[in-house]
Amino acid sequence: MRSLIVLSLASILMSGCTDAELEIEQVLEPASIQVSWDDLHELVEAFGYEQGIRQFCEDSTAASQDVFLAELSKLKGFEAKMLERVKIRAGEVQAEFDQADPQEEQEYICTVEMHASSEDRADLAREKWAEIKDLVNE
């Protein structure tokens, strides 16, 4: 893997890019936590949809996304740019539910299938989130 990274960087540098033009993924930085945008995107969506569905349908105090964002912001090792992307996506997911018409959309959102699906997805996200937190705490 290291030789692939070195080879990739060498080819980029040889093509005339400056250091300022390079956007190297956080995964390549040895001091950083090895978590990609895709990993965090999956988590923020799972927690966001679980919270959104629960708040829209039954429990206005549901807070799985809020808890995730609070825990994430306290962890060291994540780039500020990555954290900002997570917050933006969390806001977008929340806006979907804020803009939904309770009269018209309740029959589509508040189904057993939607609820179960969001819970299952959030349960998997909780497992993945626990693994990530364990990596950070090592």
Image: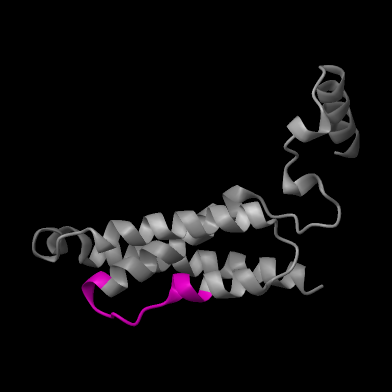
Percent position of residue 103, x then y: 8, 64
Residue 59 part of the magenta segment: yes
Q: Is residue 123 left or right of residue 57?
A: right
Q: Is residue 57 left or right of residue 3?
A: left
Q: How is the image coloured?
A: one colour
Q: Residue furthest top?
A: 15
Residue drawn at x 48%, y 55% as measured from the top left:
88
Residue 62 part of the magenta segment: yes
Total labels drawn: 0
Q: Quadrant of the N terminus?
A: top right
Residue drawn at x 69%, y 71% as measured from the top left:
75
Percent position of residue 54, x then y: 30, 73
The quadrant holding residue 7 is top right
Q: Quadrant of the C terminus?
A: bottom right
The quadrant holding residue 56 is bottom left
Residue drawn at x 61%, y 69% as measured from the top left:
72
Q: Is residue 96 left or right of residue 48?
A: left
Q: Is residue 53 left or right of residue 29?
A: left
Q: Which residues are magenta?
A: 56-67
Percent position of residue 95, x then y: 32, 58
Residue drawn at x 27%, y 61% as measured from the top left:
97
